[in-house]
Image (cartoon, rainbow, N blue to C red):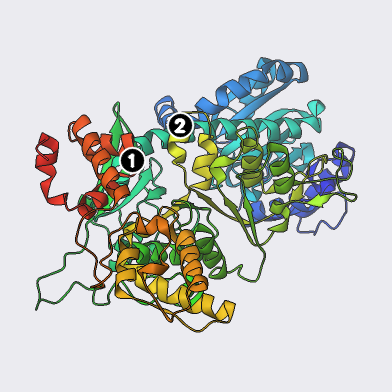
Amino acid sequence: MPVARLGEIFSIPENDHRVMDLWERFLNGEEADSDALRRLIDDSWHRCQAASVDPSRRTAAPPLGAGSLDALRDDYCELLEAGAPVMASARELLSETGTFMVLTDPSGVILSTEGDNITRSAAEDIQLMSGADWSELACGTNAIGTALEVGQPVQIHSAEHYCSGIKRWTCSATVIRNPYDGDILGVVDVSGLGPSYSRHSLALVVTTAGRIENRLARIELGARYRLLEHCVDRLSSAGSDGVIVFDRHGRAIKANERAALALAVLGASDAGVIGDGLGHLRLRWTKRQVVPETLPDWLRPEWLEPVVLDGERIGAVLSIPAPRVRSSGSRRPEGLNKPVQEPVSGPFGGVIGQSPALIQSLNRARQLARSRVSVLLLGETGVGKEVFARCIHASSAAKDSPFVALNCGGLTRDLLASELFGYAEGAFTGARRGGMIGKIEAADGGTLFLDEIGEMPIDLQPHFLRVLEEGEVYRLGENKPRTINFRLIAATNRDLRSEIPAGRFRMDLFYRIAVTSIQIPPLRERIEDVALLAEHYLALLAHEHGLEPRTLSPAVLAALEQYAWPGNIREFRNVMEGMLLMSQDLILTERDLPPEILDEVRVDASGGQDSGPALMGLESVERDVILRTIRGCGGNMAAVARELGIAKSTVYLKLKRFGLSGHLDDLRAGRV
């Protein structure tokens, strides 16, 4: 809803007599065309008239009984918990101004009050008290009900009220919104008798609502942190089930990489892992329900497991079983008749490979590209995180808007701040004349890609979080914000979750940027793509350098498939370019391999085949480290993953690569 002009936000007490005359004429069927009546009030009066609200009403309806009010307060206990200390801090000011503060639920029913006792006593005469309904439908034009209708700060004074019984009062109110999805949670209002009118009352309610929202955000952040910590093993499990975690309000907040494919197989793509949070996927249940009464057709109740800690339901985990592939000759399940490894096309055509791990990441990236939600790309150095980011941007609705990239690593704190936020002329010694636009502003309307976001200094992180939450950026040296709207894609090769307790990364920023994540596999985990990558880069680089196309001998291909590729795709490309430029032959042989690869793999120079399944040097060391860690952790694979600083699924993948996946029992017993 558009923000009202300044002249329409505040009441004008000097117009009170004219407004009263306009109200009487309005009730007689005449249109109020005077500039003394604000558009906000005129619209509200028409809503009240259309809803048959009685303009002669003297008070609100009797409040809820004690039992019903207690139950309602229990439903909104967190709103009350967040609001109580904030409202209490205004007690002295309220007493001095002869006003009192009201906190309501989203329907306008008053939950609690605070402030001047004399004024509160007078308010009881019109039922402005806990348990009473002050929506527009119940009490006509008033700050509480009208703020709920327009979703903005509202000030209503004296004659502007629709019902005659409350025209002695003046009130200011604004809505309180859920800091995560923007839903209205309630209203904070300051009311008093007519002489207590002040424009500052509106500023007070806006400030109070903001402080309550901040406290609610901290409460919710703590609850989500507890939930995700409890569910981390489920999300990182090496199993093939799709796993989605819901918070206690039924919002999907985290999913593993198999969830999108599982939803697609079920034909639930519209509810998939896209959009704000996790898109349209939301379950609705009351506080007293264990599971929702109504579920989507594709979701079976037994897949949903409540997460309960200390007797409190803090969320739920949805586990979607992996589709079963029947034996040969049997028909495959619906949705699996097409191979997963379909050719990559469109904006993602530049991502070379058809391995299952890569295709899974690509499918997830394609799905997320349709939304504006923040994405965190996870993967080792050189896996192609910026390539993924550019592909996501090119597949989005903002593809014709800017794509702005910035690497947060290797820059000093001050340089990174100026690159991110920009600066005004004269902001510091050496500042460019006329100032400089920052990368955040440059990405307005498009995509901002922040690589190595884990390197962002801890003291810059709250400033960047503010930009994400408020959609405004301040250039260094300026006090006026600039409105911006961009889609954030961040990338890191660090485990940001472990950086949080170490004090190197803020928890609130982590959950803001990690709304959804994509794990990009390292090259050593998709060795089947090496041949495709070699063909692609040899053709591309030969064209760039004006050389004839080259091919690899079988021995060289075998060596490349055996090498660990610590630098991933970036290293692979460099190796291909070096071999291409240094060789005079059309077929590249083992003689063209760099020494670092020759030192780690064994190539049979005469037969053109690798010498056998013997592990290369680095892999042998890696295998020994994993085995020692498994023994040291008593076979607890979750503990092994934490000790090694990798996902549990990666541990299982490595065991499979080393030919040990069938010996887990022996590994746990120390017999291997």
Percent across and percent down for residue 587 are 39, 79
CA distance separating discs 2 and 1: 15 Å
Query: Tag 2: residue type?
Result: Gly
Residue carrying label 2: 222
The residue nearer to you, when weighing 140 against 608, is: 608
Percent across and percent down for residue 336 are 24, 72
What numbered label is drawn on residue 657?
none
Q: Is residue 471 left or right of residue 307?
A: right
Residue carrying label 1: 232
The residue at the point 37 percent across, 46 percent down is 246
- Vertical comparison of 467 with 403: above or below: above
Query: Tag 1: residue type?
Result: Val
Percent across and percent down for residue 193 are 75, 27
- Vertical comparison of 413 with 560: above or below: above
Labels 2 and 1: the sequence-earlier one: 2
Residue 193 appears in the rendering: yes
Secondary element at image label 1: helix
Give the residue at the far bottom of this rendering.
548
The residue nearer to you, when weighing 173 against 379, is: 379
Q: Is residue 65 left or right of residue 124?
A: left
